[in-house]
Amino acid sequence: MTKLNDINDNEIRVIGGDGGGSVKKRIPWWVWVVAGIVAASVAVWLLYQKTHREELPAQSEKPVLHADTPIETEVPDIWLDNTDASLPCATIKSDTLIDSIHLQIYTPYNATPELHVGSLSSKDPDIILATMAADLRRDNGKIVGAFVLAGEPLSWGLSKKGYCAIIDGRVTIGMAENSPLFEQATEQGGYFFRQYPSVANGVMVENIPENASFRRALCNFNGRLCIIGCTDRVLMNDFSQALAHLGVSDAILLVGGTADGWYRDAEGNICPISTSTARNAKYINYIVFRKQ
């Protein structure tokens, strides 16, 4: 019997072959270099993304206060006075666009603020800015919320938590259910009224009214007292959010819509903000800035 492993004299056997199988090809060295570079790049990118995400603050919605949020009553320490010897006794108007809302900013300089009840003439040469302040009731036409006129309380009520106090020619605005400034204004011959809060400590305040209208607010903006209005009808909460995005510290809403209002510019021109047909209402009231 012939053994299978024997080699005959007429046979040739190749030593070191793969027994007739496929021959494995070696991978070129440069392929390994490229793969190493790609792997290192991916590792660096992933590490960067992880570190970058850890450094970024957690994404969250802008804070919002609600009008019924309990607010501790405290006497504010921010009193605004727009006195500036380098500027004329006039109102300076500027425009800006925030959240697609066109805002107009009216800043009165070198003027004394006060409240006024009753009809008011835009021809008064001492007035550089005037606009309606507190709302009127529909049933009897009286003022809504607490109101003090030169030390005399004309109405009471806490239906709106925003407030404005004017004492010794300086103004403060804020949000509180009860404020000792009502009594202080009464005792010191000052002024006080309530309105819807709009911004408190830089945070938008959400209110229930959601009809679209022309809006107006009394604001603390960059340490100055100003009135900001919009030229388009917008929702109240959208307007308040725009004020917060603008950088307003505190704000309360004023009578909006077509509420009466005007200002006097540096050239002495009387410029209307809007004109109301309710000028002769008995309890119509204004926040007024008179030349010092």
Image (tube, rainbow, N blue to C red):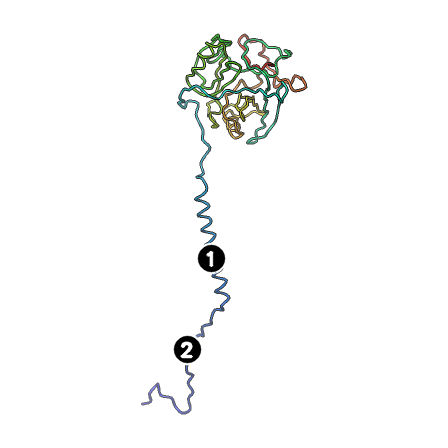
Q: Position of residue 163 (x, y in %)?
A: 47, 18
Q: Amino acid at mark 1?
A: Ala
Q: Is residue 16 above or below residue 115?
A: below
The residue lying furthest to the bottom in this view is: 9
Question: Which circle, 1 or 2, is nearer the viewer?
Answer: 1
Tell me the residue at 56%/30% (across/down). 98
Q: Quadrant of the N terminus?
A: bottom left
Q: Position of residue 216 (x, y in %)?
A: 55, 21
In space, the residues marked 1 and 2 are separated at their CA atoms by: 37 Å
The label shown at residue 27 is none
Between disc 1 and disc 2, whose residue precedes?
Answer: 2
The residue lying furthest to the front in this view is: 85
State which quadrant residue 132 falls in: top right
Pointer 2 local density, CA inside 10 Å: few below 14, some 14–19, many at least 20: few
Q: Which residue is mark 1?
A: 40
Pointer 1 local density, CA inside 10 Å: few below 14, some 14–19, many at least 20: few
- Could you tell me how many numbered marks the image carries? 2
Residue 146 shown left or right of residue 89 in the figure: left
Give whichever of 5, 291 is nearer the camera: 291
Tell me the residue at 57%/29% (across/down). 101
Tell me the residue at 51%/9% (across/down). 150
The residue lying furthest to the left in this view is: 1
Q: Amino acid at mark 2?
A: Asp
Q: Which residue is mark 2?
A: 18
Q: Position of residue 6 (x, y in %)?
A: 35, 88
Give whichever of 202, 97 is nearer the camera: 202
Residue 254 shown left or right of residue 73 in the figure: right
Q: Quadrant of the C terminus?
A: top right
Q: Position of residue 228 (x, y in %)?
A: 56, 23
Give whichever of 180, 140 is nearer the camera: 180
Q: Identify the secondary structure beneath mark 2.
A: loop
